[in-house]
Image: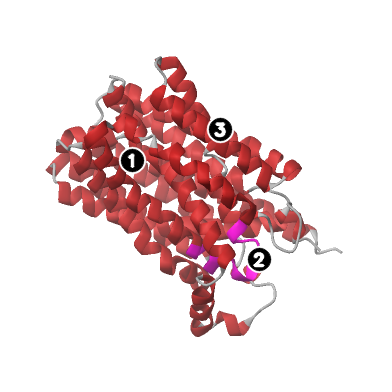
Amino acid sequence: MDVAPAPSRAVRIARNGVAVTFTLNGLAVGSWFSRVPAVREALDLSAGRLGLLLLAMSVGALLAMPTSGLLAQRLGAARTVTLATVLVAIGLTVAGLGATLTGSFAVVAIGLVAFGYGSGACDVAMNVEAAAVERRLGRTIMPRFHAGWSLGSVAGAGLGAGAARLDVAVGTHLCAVALVVLTGTVLATRTYLPMSAHDPDGDSADATPAGRRRAQLAAWREPRTLLIGLFVLVAAFTEGAANDWLAVAFVDGRDLSEAAGAAVFAVFVVGMTLGRTAGTVALDRWGRVPVLSGTIGLAVLGAGLAVLAGSGPLAIVGVALWGLGASLGFPVGMSAAADEEAYAPVRVSVVAVIGYTAFLAGPPLLGLLGDHVGTLRALLVVPLLLLPTLLLVPVLRPPHAGEQAPSAHQN
């Protein structure tokens, strides 16, 4: 009985460290996406060419996914996140300086591959750590970690809008962000749970390299894991389409300035942040299935308004609803993949691989559509994909229990 407070304090400290990690990762990603219009201008890219450039980041992320779960198991989440963030900082710096100093498509693409690889590896590892913390807290908190990511994105978008208005060079801006993100993440990972806390049963057979590889292959044959991955794929596309194209679409389709386009992206991320903050209460009260069904409906309505609304204010309301509706799909999908802790790293890795194919296919798909119908109308793909996703929502119900995943694992 005397030792109970120590784990509780360790979990609270780890919770704060994970929240900082998510926030700083969001700051890096939001900073990049807020400057996409400026990079397009610097490189003089068409919508199709911009889609190919954004594809470089997605390729990097997808390359990281298959091995990130195994790496997190072997090195621990803290080391994996640290190493991944080094790559994020390097990639962000190369992409920014490539656009500013060289004007080279190839240099920016190389930077984005590194940025994407680091972001992908970091994503898996920090979600594994977040799921472990959530399980020990005994209540839903994963969306709030992702709300921290969204809050970081809001800050990144706001800084990006300010930097665009003040004509701060993309390279200068992104180099400064890279330094802040790397320093803060290194400090935050020191608070993570020790590796032993992620393996309470001490399964030495599964801890061997051969055991890890067998677990990874087995996860690819699990119907529930694959269906969760498909759900996360659409959730990622819903979120990623806005990240990649919302600012550009409103600049092109609604004749806004570059700074105003970045501000529209900030509205989307504010909606995401609010949804992820309030969503934990809704999830604990009503469960995953009804809450996700409702938020998907909001995303369909919001994306439709953002594209089709005749007035600017109504379109902005649509952007906010889109962000609110897209807020819970990705984090709840990751929680569902990690429902059983012993298999969490490999299952999260599998779900991430499937989900991140949306980031791989999304930019060029929307870019090519944008060349034919305009970047704004190309975003109508989002509600068309979301509607059939409602059929997948029941798969996210926790196994062997009711709707409350974290408390279902309490003793």
Q: Is residue 155 above or below residue 197?
A: above
- Check if mark 2's residue and mark 1's residue have beta carbons within 8 Å: no
Image quarter hosting the C terminus? bottom right
Name which residue type carries label 2. Answer: Glu
Query: Splitting the image into 4 quarters, where does residue 29 fall?
Result: top left
Residue at 40 percent across and 16 percent down: it is 312
Residue identified by numbered label 2: 340
Residue type, numbered disc 3: Leu
Task: Specify the quadrant of the image occupied by residue 28.
Answer: top left
Q: Horizontal placement of 395 versus 99: left or right? A: right
Q: CA–CA distance between discs 3 and 2?
A: 30 Å
Q: Is residue 261 left or right of residue 300?
A: left
Question: What residue is pinned by disc 1?
Answer: 32
Q: Residue drawn at (56%, 32%), measured in percent from left and top? A: 298
Q: Earlier in the sequence, mark 1 or mark 3?
A: 1
Above or below, 72 relative to 94: below
Q: What label does residue 298 carry, if any?
A: 3
- Seen in the picture, residue 119 relative to 23 is either above or below; the reply is below
Highlighted magenta segment, given as a residue range = 336-350
